Structure formats: C-alpha cells, structure tokens
Image (cartoon, grey):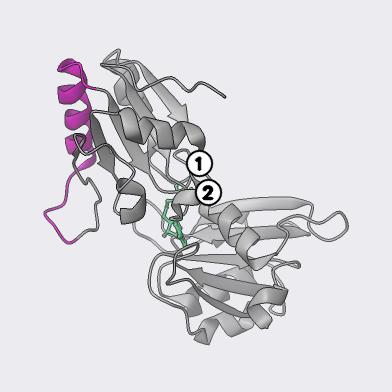
Amino acid sequence: MISIPDAEPGQVYLVGAGPGDPALLTLRAAHLLKTADVILPDDLVSEEILELASPTTLIIPVGKRCGQPRITQAGIHDLMLEHTRNDSSVVRLKSGDPLVFGRAAEEIAFLREHHIPFEIVPGITAAFAVAASLEAPLTDRTRASKLILATAHHAAGKLSLTPSWSGSFPDEATLVIYMPGRDFETLAADLIASGIAPTTPCTAVSSASTPQQHTYTTTLAGLRSANVGPAPVILLIGPEVHPAKAQA
Ligand code: SAH
C-alpha cells in the first residue's frame, strides 16, 4: 500500500485535473481532492472530478468563462490568501497540467510574495490525452523529432502565430495548438505562410476524454473549412497525426 499525505492546513496545492476523465487523475490529485478544505476549480474541470471531493469541502468555482460574473485573477489570489490565513488547505484545480497555459506563473509569484507554502501536482495535459485517444504518436524517430505546444490565443487577444516562428516553422515537428479560437481560415493561412506544408495532417478534437468527444481529421489546408465541435478544442498538426481511429 502506498501512503499519500493529506492536504495540510494553510497550504495551497496547484493541481492538474487532467483532460476530464476522472480515471486520468493522478493518485496524489485524487487524494488532495478528498482531503482539502477548499477547492477552487477552473471551468474546464468536469463535474465527475468535483464529485470526488469530500462532502464537507467548500467548492468555489473560479472559471473565467462560466457565464457567471467574471472572477479576476486578483480575485482568485484573494481567495487563496483568505482561506490559507484561516488555516484551510486549498486546492487550486486546473484542467490538464497546471503549468501548461494555466496562468500558473502569476499564482506562483503571488504565493511566494505572500509566503504561502504550496506544492504543484502535475496532470495529464490535453495534448497527451488527445494523442492517446487517437493512437497518434506526437514524436516519431524518423518524422517528428520535436513537439511544440503553442496557443493561438495571445494575451493581447490577437490571433497570430507566425511572429513566434520568425517566419519559418521547424521541420519535422508536431505542433499542438491550445485555445485555437474559431477563425480557422486565418489560423491555417498563418501556419501555411510560416512554412508548414498545406498537406500536413491536422486533427481537431473537441471535449477530449469526455462522452462528448468529437474528432475531425483533415489537412492543414482543409482546416479552413473544418467542421470542428464546440470548445474546448485542441489542434494537432504534424506528420503522425492522421490517426487510424479517427479515420475509421
Ligand atoms: N492546462 C490545460 C490547458 C488550459 S488552456 C492543459 O494542460 O490541458 C485551455 C485549452 O486547453 C482549451 O482551449 C483547449 O485548447 C485545451 N483543452 C483542455 N481540455 C481539453 C479537452 N478535454 N479537449 C480538448 N481540448 C482541451
């Protein structure tokens, strides 16, 4: 039997909840959900995962897109401070991995500044869950030696990828795009302009690892008119992302 420590009073845990399926949580994450006093989940964290919390746990949703009054990043910081000062243990629950497109840098800086002890618990990032469900390797010994995790959603709200590559995209890479937005025409044009072949396989997956998962496989050129499911959507572009499963 392995022994997993309980959540400690006055501590914050930045925990990855994985892509949605509770079976993809780490044992550490599942145990912290059961033993924490307070959970602050993002809106992409599934109900099934929150059901693992103890009935006495206070759950305060802090998603910024859940149609309720928007909570600011500063508001999330205030909640972490308030509850740790009351000697509660706080799980800040983020979808996927907390260090991948999760604004963790701001939370870590805040916790350090206020001398609040914290631990980071990794989770399965959406890219890895999607690749597994499609049986699509992200790297390949001969055709994909690099893996790039990118977002098309810049902090300034501007949709543009090409400046990041200085006009040329590395050869033999798999590119995973988080938060791709809905303007696939511009995105595909940007990527083709940056040197990725229009014939490169491209798979768009919506709500991966949930019963609503929707998969659409095309080429980069075909992405312009892709019939992609509702958010959250992730794009995999690369030589190996023409999954047998999605084509079946
Ligand atoms: N920290 C998360 C990413 C948060 S950014 C992680 O490591 O996965 C939010 C983006 O992640 C979404 O816009 C989408 O691009 C992607 N995403 C998260 N969960 C997803 C899912 N179940 N299916 C498809 N995309 C997902």
Q: Is residue 128 magenta?
A: no
Mark 1 Cα-neighbour bin, 10 Å: few <14, some 14–19, many ≥20 = many
* Residue bearing mark 1: 123
**Residue 91, percent across and down?**
31, 32
Mark 1, ligand 1, within 8 Å: the answer is: yes
Mark 2, ligand 1, within 8 Å: the answer is: yes
Say which mark, if any, is on residue 125. Answer: 2
Q: Are marks 2 and 1 in contact (CB under 8 Å)?
A: yes
- Compared with residue 232, is residue 61 higher up or lower down, i.e. above or below? above
Q: Which residues are magenta?
A: 67-88
Evaluate whether residue 13 shows in this view: yes
Side of 236 where 232 appears, left or right: left
- Compared with residue 6, is residue 150 higher up or lower down, i.e. above or below? below
Between residues 188 and 203, which one lies in front from this camera angle?
A: 203
Side of 228 where 46 appears, left or right: left
**Residue 238, percent across and down?**
70, 66
